Amino acid sequence: MRAGFVLALFILLYTAEKAVVGFQSLTGPGVSARFGQIVFQLLALLQLTLALFFGLLFVAGRISQEKDRATLILLLMSDMKDRELVGGKLSSGIVSVAVMLVATLPVMFILQMLGGITTAQILWTAAISAMAAFASASWGAFVAFWRDKTFQTLAIGLLGMVAFLAVIEIAVAAVGATNPVGMVLGSFDPYRSLMEVICPLAFQTDLGPVSVSAWPGVLAMAFLAAAFQTSAVLGLRKWNPVRSVYQFAQKAKQDQTEEAAAERDTSRDVWNVPIIWREIRTRAYGRRVIFIKAVYMVMALAGYAFIAISPADPEPMLGGLLTAPGFVFVALALVTFVLVNAQAVTSLTSERDGRTLELLLVTEITSREFVLGKIGGVLYNTKELIIAPLIALVLIALQGQMSAENLIFAGLGFLSLVAFAAVVGFHSAMSHANSRNAIAASLGTVFFLFVGIFIFILLLVEARSSFALQFQSFLVFIVAGSILLGASLTYQNPSAALWLASAILPFLTFYSIASYMLGRPGESTLAVVAAYLFATIAMLIPALSEFTLTVAKSVERRR
């Protein structure tokens, strides 16, 4: 992992150098320093984003797996102290992120040789990323010990982090960034603290020497981490074991009476397709899913209000690629992709950890019924999350900022990506016997895919003068992405179709972005639909035909 991560950074550096500078050498200290500064800013933002996401994911995944396998009760029965249990799980989950941050430091110091970067900037960037990862992991531990279901943990963790950053930015905008209260609130946003480090001249208000410091941001992240850890320690015994354990014991006593026996004989009507009935008509993902949807809809309503009050001709962002209303749609869509993927992967891992998946092997349920039932249930349960970004698109069109043709194109592309996110989650759960690895592989694939698209966009903005010539500079990045995607999708399930899908998906993604920037939305949509639907079908067909065999292999690997 360490070697692969550093190799990926150097591939990114090579791609950025060819995209920004071209195939000529870096001539002159000014050009060299400018390139070093641009790439350092890109890597710093990427490092912070990865630290926040994987700090939450790794810690929450470890604790959720203990709950799903009912082994957390055994830990609570030991003489281990509460702070030891919370701290041990937190440390074991975040150690991978810490190692990656340490491995990034030599790459940053190599960039310093180009000029335009100081040692203080590198060290403060590492400090902000480390403390932000620690705070994110502490938040993940708090939610994982609090909630019972894995999907609830991942969804609340992600939505809570996004909502927290949004509330901080709204509060800073309301009171003013230069106001003392606004400065204190701004220190709780790690991205704002990072921007002050990597772009110090933009925040320098006086004529004195430029100083780089991020003490407020580091201390704010440390305060959040301490608060979440203390809350997790205090609530550990109150939240665990879960209430269902006590209810099960009480129900066992009540079953001795004749009245309880008569009540047990009654049952609900089950559909002819029991899998999708269970996904839709039961509380398979806990009682707090409605709360998760409510939080998401509050975020969506805030975005709708922002679109409604935006001017008819808003200023473009990201080099003219997006407007502010368009950014609202993109933000909602990204959260939807992650949540749909999380529910898809946990729909199968929860069955396996609950020891109910093996029972399906001795029933008459076919592979088609199970796979389509699970995926259909995922799409049904997340229908509100899928519809919300589409409503944002309609509002943007009603504001006159998008034509009806582009509205259809954007909607088709969004739905194609939703289908891909759902199927790749189910595919990862089938491929990995360990639930924690399945969740990390699934969410990691979706996360890295869209992070790669974002990096594509940033670099293409720098090289938008000639896409035909710049394609060569992105070739190494695209090929490396194809290999990594293929390795992820074909883990334990080799398939020529999946390798073909992994090979063409990054190329068509590049073509889609380039077509969009050249003002060809139809070609862009066609490329997205073709690439992601082909990958979706390539994962879905083996699942429909070989589900029983795959599950049997997964059970055997676990044993």
Image (cartoon, rainbow, N blue to C red):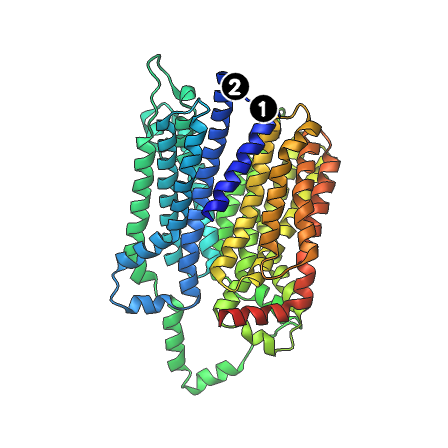
Question: Which label sits on residue 31?
Answer: 2
**Residue situated in front as seen by the camera: 278 or 487:** 487
Determine whether, in the image, residue 233 is placed left or right of residue 277: left
Disc 1 crowd, CA 10 A, few/some/many (<14, 14-19, 20+) = some
Establish if 142 lies above or below 75: above
Residue underneath mark 1: 21
Determine whether, in the image, residue 286 is placed left or right of residue 313: left
Whether pointer 1 and pointer 2 mark residues with C-beta atoms closer than 8 Å, the reply is yes
Residue 433 percent coordinates (x, y)? 52, 64
Residue 499 percent coordinates (x, y)? 67, 52
Looking at numbered disc 2 in the image, what kind of residue is underneath it? Val
Looking at numbered disc 1 in the image, what kind of residue is underneath it? Val
Establish if 158 lies above or below 150: above
Cα distance between the residues tagged 1 and 2: 8 Å
Which residue is at a point 52% across and 69% down the rendered structure image? 557
Q: Most extreme residue toward the top, as rendered?
A: 207
Question: Residue 203 is drawn in which quadrant?
Answer: top left
Looking at the rendered structure, the secondary structure element under dot 1 is loop
Residue 308 seen in the current view: no
Q: Earlier in the sequence, mark 1 or mark 2?
A: 1
Q: Most extreme residue toward the bottom, as rendered?
A: 258
Question: Which label sits on residue 161?
Answer: none
Count of numbered badges drawn on the protein: 2
Residue 64 percent coordinates (x, y)? 42, 60
